[in-house]
Image (spheres, rainbow, N blue to C red):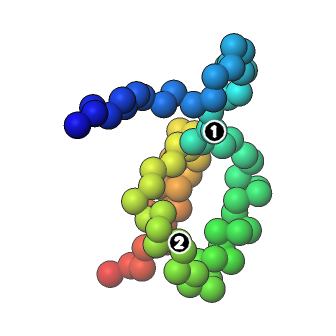
Amino acid sequence: MPQSQLRVYFGPECESVDTSVEPPRETVTIPLEEVFPLLAEAVQSQRTWLRDFEGDEITISTDLYEVLLAYQHFRRPSA
């Protein structure tokens, strides 16, 4: 019985490989003014796709974080 001749395929044989192509980025930096209206509308409309991102973390500036904390504190209903 003749033995099978198996070999590993490495793709098309070409001499030059284009290494200038960047891998896709996993983050994008955009102004909040572009995100706010879209997120507000999505929350108000209760879009289900928002649940896909509930566990995602975002990075914000320290001053925005402090403003959000103060806003959260003062909007609490008084007991």
Label 2 close to label 1 by CB (< 8 Å): no
Q: Secondary structure at mark 2?
A: helix
- Residue displayed at 68% across by 77% down: 41
Residue that numbered label 1 is attached to: 24
**For this rendering, which residue is in front, 44 or 26?**
26
Front: mark 2 or 1: 1
Picture quarter with the N terminus: top left
Is 33 placed above or below 44 here?
Answer: above
Residue that numbered label 2 is attached to: 50
Image coordinates for residue 77, horizontal then vertical, percent: 42, 79
Q: What amino acid type should be assigned to the residue bearing mark 1?
A: Pro
Q: Is residue 73 left or right of residue 45?
A: left
Q: Quadrant of residue 38?
A: bottom right
Is 65 placed above or below 43 here?
Answer: above
Image coordinates for residue 40, horizontal then vertical, percent: 66, 73
Image coordinates for residue 72, horizontal then vertical, percent: 47, 64
